[in-house]
Image: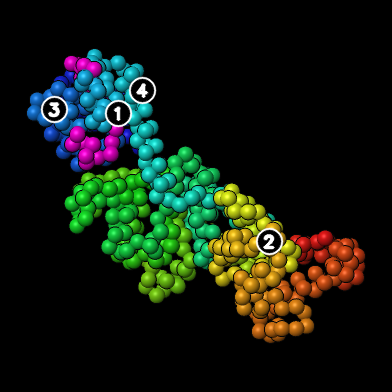
Amino acid sequence: MPETILIIDDEQAIRESLAGILADEGFAPLTAASAEEGLQLLDDKDIRLILLDIWMPGLDGLEALKLIKQRFSLPVIMISGHGTIETAVQATRSGAFDFIEKPLSYDKTILSIKKGLQLAQLERDNQVLRESGPALTHITGVSPQITALRQQIERVAPTDAWVLIRGGHGTGKELVAQTIHRHSLRAKHPMVAVNCAAIPEELIESELFGHVKGAFTGATDAKKGKFDLANGSTLFLDEIGDMSLKSQAKVLRILQEQKFERVGGSRTIEVDVRVLAATNKNLEIEIEQGNFRADLFYRLNVVPIDVPDLADRRQDIPLLIADFVNQFCKKGVAWKQFSSEALALLQQHHWPGNVRELRNLVERLVIMTPADEIKGEDVALFLGSSIAKAATPLGGGVPYTTLSFKDARRRFESEYLRAKLDENDGNISKTAEQIGMERSHLHKKVKALGIAVK
């Protein structure tokens, strides 16, 4: 949508001429014959840049500039037919982006406007980056589940389709959202993320839609909301299932119309936002229990993507560990190697906290283990009793009957094949012949179980 430029000048001919030029360049011009009228328009319209004359009856341009900079974060270009160096310096010190003398040069004016808009967009992007955490990098893994996940992302990312990302705590839902955004047509601006579970219900509207000065106690300044900051980019609504029903109703209307008003304001703001949402809850059950709106679910669930639990892709654990160790090394932590026994124990853990739990444990091990190699006993020490159930050797410890069928079978296969491979010094062909299995089948099984072959 065209960006709105406000022209404040007491000369009608200047206003009409500039308005025509801006319209030809694809902007949406607004005009005001006085500073007072211009300030009123700023309260009522979504304006991106101001062309402001200095010498006007009533409130002059320099006084208006100070008021504008106090209340709005907008680039202001001063124009004057009686400009002096002293006036230009004063305007710049008061926050003007540029100073252009009359008669106005068409090319110089358009160039200055474009530079001003670029600077304003850069400031908005920087604000988003400051408020967000460190950018995540890439999805690590070679398991069938992760391969399928990457293929889904590749298909949906270049479109503008909305996506509902589902998965347990710590599975990497935000990383999936960032990857979708990074490969989208909106990637030139940062993704704006909102943690719906971390914002109190009474503040969610202000966080999402912004507020005007004096809208409520403590609102000493106007503030743009996340929808406004995400204009032209992607908005990520994390843990959408934790949003209250009242907030859901308001968000649904905004999502449908792509229009909203700031808290305490009356000006309607239009945005162009792609929405990605994530939840660790079963929203169909939440709908049945009356905790989530069905119409909001169907609006968000255009393309559903499920992120697998770490326990369902254990073969990726060695790759994830190597990735984490490299990340920690870049932060000044000494590089450590994990022994095959340590990797085996980590692959057998249940990981209720998924990838986040694994990352935290790896960081703890790398920092707190004094030796250069992290061994099985180090892992057992940090995991404590939780590793005993998963790491019991064949023929002893916790019986298989205490495990689920899936975990018991996987544990037996892993321990059995490790033992047989050790007997044959890691020779796949010899082991396959010994246990009566096709070599290619054994190779796939070894890879799926994440067994390190000598």
Instruction: For label 4, count other residues whose C-alpha is less than 10 Å away and answer few (under 14), some (14-19) or many (20+).
Output: few
Local crowd size for mark 2, using a 10 Å CA cut-off: few (<14), some (14–19), many (≥20)? few
- Amino acid carrying mark 1 in the image: Phe
Q: How is the image coloured?
A: rainbow
Asked whether 185 falls inside the magenta stretch, the response is: no
Which residues lie in the magenta part?
Answer: 66-85
Q: Quadrant of residue 106?
A: top left
Locate residue 189 relative to residue 312 in the image: left or right: left
Could you tell me if the residues under marks 2 and 3 are in contact, i.e. CB atoms within 8 Å? no
Q: Disc 3 or 1, which lies upstream in sequence?
A: 3
Task: Report the residue marked by disc 4.
Answer: 111
Q: Is residue 79 magenta?
A: yes
The residue wearing badge 3 is 60
What type is the residue that disc 3 sits on? Answer: Asp
- Judge left or right: residue 343 versus residue 77: right
Going 61% across and 70% down the picture, which residue do you hit?
382
Q: CA distance from mark 2 to mark 3?
A: 72 Å
Residue of label 1: 97
From the viewer's perspective, is residue 41 above or below residue 20? below
75 over 370 or under it: above or below: above
